[in-house]
Amino acid sequence: MLRALAKFNPGVSISCVEGERTVHRLADMFVDDKDMWTASTQPENPREIDDMLTDFRRAAQAWERILFASGGLLALHKCYWWVVAWRWIDGMPEMVTEEDYPATLKLTNGNDPAAVPITRLGPDDANVGLGFRMAPSGSQHLEVAYRTKQSNQLAARLNTTTLTATEAWVLYNSIYIPKVYYPCKISAFTRREWNDVTRAATGAFLSRMGFNRNTSRRAMFRPDRLGVAGLTDGFSRQGADGITHFLTHTRWNSELGKVMLNVLSHLQLLSGRGACLLEEPEPLPQKIQNKKRNILHWQYLGRSWLLTLRD
């Protein structure tokens, strides 16, 4: 099916700055989920986005036909699409929005000849992909909100139970940590955001573990061998998991590892810094900066694990 799709979809190529390493992606698939990519083949063409959208319409409809011929059927109400493009303002890139480039996508499905409009999402709108919410712009505000709600709901339930300290510890490590810290490998929450996510649950677990819920968090996140709760700090866990994730794929020389290095080379170039970002990462500003003025605020590889390397 993918070989058939390749005849209709040019896919996307991600190269490093030097052009020595290129990864070509036609689509990313997992069971019944699929992300298809279509890139511009004429970057110097003034009608670049128009031509790219024409190619994408053809590829999307071709995939629907291929899937239907194999006995499957698209759920069009679950399909979404984005236009990921930039316009340069005063030498700085800004993502194109629907207001900048209004366009529609309609597909037929199965034996029904009626074309159905497909929902278009903006650069800051996230779709749920394998349990993680990330938008093309890199914004993770929806993921932060979801994990906060998830953690608070578990804390509310915990407050109504009567658990022993051992049972609370088992619940924390076997349920809470895998559930709430699931996105740590690729998330980019700030320390404040992690504190907001875990604040209610931390107090609830401390009280069930036999500690005062107002005990200093600096002490409670220390190793349990020191006689404290030994809770897991989200920001530190995110940094450690992010570094492990990065090193695992780059050392294995996997396709994802090559993509990471290729994107990192562009981030290095756009940062304008001579020193390697991984060796001397630039700390984030305390206040949110205008993206036009702070190129390092782009969230290609996440923020916290770069700071972890620095620390």
Image: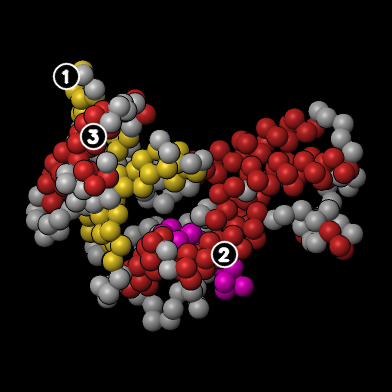
Q: Are marks 3 and 2 in contact (CB under 8 Å)?
A: no
Residue 306 vertical placement versus 291 (above, below): below
Q: Is residue 263 left or right of residue 156?
A: left
**From this viewpoint, which residue is outermost toward the front?**
70
Q: Which residue is mark 3?
A: 66
- The residue where tag 2 is placed is 244
* Three-letter residue code for mark 1: Pro
**For residue 187, which numbered disc appears in the image?**
none
Secondary structure state at the residue bearing disc 2: helix
Which residue position is annotated with label 1? 113
- Bounds of the magenta segment: 299-311
Q: SS of the residue at dot 3?
A: helix
Look at the image and say whether residue 301 sits in the magenta stretch. yes
Q: Position of residue 93 (x, y in %)?
A: 28, 59
Q: Amino acid at mark 2?
A: Thr
Q: Which element carries disc 1, helix, strand or loop?
A: strand
The residues tagged by marks 1 and 3 sit, at their Cα atoms, a distance apart of: 16 Å
Tell me the quadrant of the picture where the C terminus can be found. bottom right
Residue at x 12%, y 46% (from the top left corner): 51
- Please indicate whether residue 44 sits to the left or right of residue 266 in the image: left
Residue 247 vs residue 264, the one in the foreground: 247
- Relative to 204, does residue 259 appear above or below in the rendering? below
Residue 31 coordinates in the image, percent (x, y): 43, 39
Where residue 213 appears, as percent x and y from the top left, is: 83, 45
